[in-house]
Each structure stands twice: as structure tokens, then as C-alpha cells.
Amino acid sequence: MARKGLWLRSIVLGAVVLMATGAGHTFDGNDVLKIKTTKRCRSCDLYAAELAGADLSGADLTAAKLVDAKLAGANLNSARLAAALWMDGRTCAPGSIGACK
């Protein structure tokens, strides 16, 4: 019986750790399509999205969640990034255009 209780506690602890770290959370596919086709995606969930090499010039990514997004080689010229949650977890400052400040 003690083993069953320990097993259950381990499962619950594992679930709590996964939820707290965001592990298992992925981007919203509709949001990826939206940003690629319209370049307007305010407050989008792009967590860990594959956007490497994408042309996001002039895109409105205000308050978008970009944590762990793959943006290598993406064109962010003139992209609006104010209040976006950046790849490294920091929040972009107001007026961030083309780069997270």
C-alpha cells in the first residue's frame, strides 16, 4: 500500500512540475497561420512556434507569446513587439519595433 501512495504522489508531483514549467505547452496552429498570412496577431500564442526564416516584416506581434519560438533568420524589420513575451521570457518594452527592447 505504501508503494501505491508513493507512486500516486510521484505522478501528482510530475504533473505539477510540467504545468509550472510550461512543458508540454505548444503554440496555437491557428495563430501561426494567422501571423504568416495576415501579419496581424496581437496577443497570439506562438509559444515554441517554428517561425525560422519567416517574413514577419511589419507584423503586429503586440503582446504575443514568443517564448521558445524559433525565429532564426526571421525578418522582423518594423515588426511591432511592444508587450510581447520574448523568446527568453522577458517582456518587450513599449515602442519595441523590429527588436525586443
Image (spheres, grey):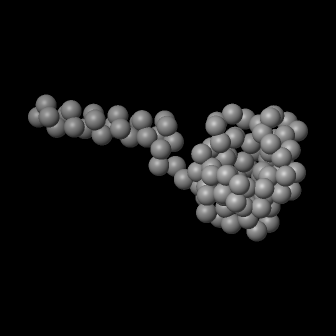
Residue 60 seen anywhere in this rendered image of the structure: no
Taking 99 as reference, is 48 above or below it? below
In the displayed structure, does residue 44 sit left or right of residue 94? left
**Residue that appears at 27% across and 33% down:** 9
In the displayed structure, does residue 93 sit left or right of residue 90? right
Residue 5 percent location from the top left of the image: 20, 34
Taking 5 as reference, is 68 above or below it? below
Q: Residue furthest front?
A: 73
Residue 20 percent location from the top left of the image: 49, 35
Total numbered circles = 0
**Residue that appears at 71% across and 54% down:** 73
Which quadrant is the C terminus positioned in? Answer: top right
Residue 45 percent location from the top left of the image: 65, 52
Taking 26 as reference, is 89 above or below it? above
**Residue that appears at 38% across and 40% down:** 15
Q: Residue furthest bottom?
A: 37
Residue 65 seen anywhere in this rendered image of the structure: yes
Which quadrant is the N terminus positioned in? Answer: top left
Residue 64 percent location from the top left of the image: 72, 48
**Residue that appears at 65% across and 42% down:** 87
> In terms of depth relative to the viewer, which is nearer, 32 or 6?
32
In the displayed structure, does residue 101 sit left or right of residue 53? right
